[in-house]
Amino acid sequence: MTNPSPSWLEVTLSFLGDGELGNVLQAFAAPWPRGGPPAPSERPWGHDFAALERELADPVVLATVPDRLGGEIDRAQAELFGRRTAAVDELLASIGDRPARALRVGFRERLLGILAAAGPRAPRVRALADFYYSHACRHLHRRAHGDSLPPLASALSSLRWTTLTDGLARATIDGLFAEGPTHVNLLRVEPRRQPIDVVDCRGDAGAGVPFVDTVARLGARAATSGGFFLYSEADIAPPSRRHDPVGLLVQGGEVRSPAWLRRGALAINRAGMAWIERIGPERMTMWLRTRTLDPSTIVNRASGERGPDMASIAVVGDRVVAVGRALAVPLNGAVLACEDATIGDRVQLAIPGIATAIAGGPVLLEQGRVVLDLRREDFWGTAPPVTFSQDETGDANLLPRLAVGTVGNELVFAAIDGRNLERALGMTLGDVASLMSALGCTDALNLDGGSSKRMVVDGMTLDLPSTDLVGVNAAADPGLRPVYTAIVIGIRADVVATP
């Protein structure tokens, strides 16, 4: 009996030898959803690594990416993902050593597998490009500097805060550390002295108004981007729209986006006390006409795609969009038990004790402990954003991030840049949790990061752009993506923020 041929992965790991980059090659072995079937067997390869490398060298593969994704997302977004895949491939080729050659084979093999798989493919292609780019950059820096660089923690011991006004200060971490180049903008805020609100910015964003101009119109001293929104999901259907908020958003005591998903959120009461809490349907008071609704009957996209075989309503936002039994669960809504309802009915919603809130997730720190429990916060199945619910990297992806934490009566915001070879590689969620802990936070929350992460102070955008990859053979001026929800600090009392 002949022995079966080794897989391409076994051949590549053997060529690579020992090292942590082997974990990079093993990511993206199977499509989601989480909790789905086991990973399929890897493609067998009966030759050596050099032959595999030659077989995968066809440049046409990368050129077809925009066309292969065009049926799922708009053309501009498909071309953006095409540029990212080309930039990653070119960077790996320019490094050219043994680890980079192994990573380039892994990148192309995984890309071919994703393009050949059933859709949706776009979010997987985006995640793959980010993942391989960040680890290629980290490898390049470690090769150049070895163990000669100080840890990031060394910068925190000498961190210098600049007071902007009473209850508001800023600081910057900028340098080359053992973890790689790092650029982080920090804000320290006392909510009782500097009022904080959340704003739905979709109107301005849709009209092409830059976020920095929106902040100026509101008269705020500072602002950051906010929570997640619908973006790369393949099944966005009316009444949902691309860029709709995902998770809780409370403005002026009014629930603007319900907590159909149980997610970590920043919450503030009318007295200016701020805290971080997981807020889901059980925290909402819900009623339809005169009937109180039972949150224990709710099914969202983290728990299933079909509601129970009982009289139910499907709700998006606060509107009933379907009535019946065994209803399809809306992407950005829920199904819950209710009789005698009509399509178009409005579900009344309230969360007592909260004046301002915005959901993100996952919670990073809880009473000083690192938690990162994605399943507990409904990052699962087909729940948006799928980049979190269907992460195939096991939190090994270095990305731009935004986080907020509590230090006594203060909040600390950290806007972490990434996708930049020379200035900022980005961080994993675990890295961000460690950073927030080192900054003295007892509780901390991840907010929406990636290209949407933004921090504005006194009319200046502080972030390094990250819509495209910045570095070797990548975009030199990638621009800034619009912001769709925001956290504003020190807003003028005479300004009324409207969606």
Image (cartoon, rainbow, N blue to C red):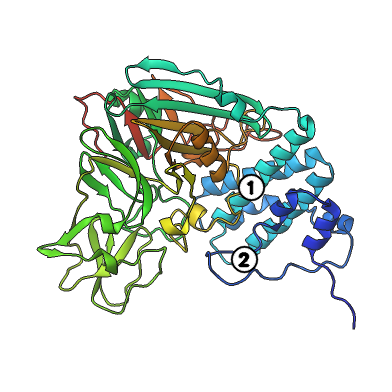
Q: Secondary structure at mark 2?
A: loop
Amino acid type indicated by mark 2: Ala
Q: Nearer the viewer, residue 365 or 74?
A: 365
Q: Is residue 490 above or below residue 299?
A: above
Q: Secondary structure at mark 1?
A: helix
Q: Which residue is farthest left?
A: 290
Name the image quarter holding the C terminus. Answer: top left
Q: Which is in the foreground here, disc 1 or disc 2?
A: 1
Q: Quadrant of residue 152?
A: top right
Q: Residues within 10 Å of mark 1 (few under 14, many from 20)?
A: many
Q: Nearer the viewer, residue 76 or 275?
A: 275
| Residue at the spot of label 2 | 117
Where residue 482 appears, as percent x and y from the top left, is 43, 36
Where residue 439 appears, as percent x and y from the top left, is 49, 31
Q: Quadrant of residue 329?
A: bottom left
| Residue at the spot of label 1 | 131
Q: Nearer the viewer, residue 61 or 464?
A: 464
On screen, residue 355 versus residue 425, left or right, reads left
Residue 59 visible here = no
Give me the C-alpha separation between circle 1 and circle 2.
19 Å
Q: Residues within 10 Å of mark 2 (few under 14, many from 20)?
A: few
User: Of the residues under marks 1 and 2, which one precedes in the sequence?
Assistant: 2
Q: Is residue 79 above or below residue 111?
A: above
On screen, residue 100 versus residue 259, left or right, reads right
Q: Is residue 166 above or below residue 407?
A: above
On screen, residue 179 versus residue 305, left or right, reads right
Look at 61% across and 26% down and name the residue there. 154
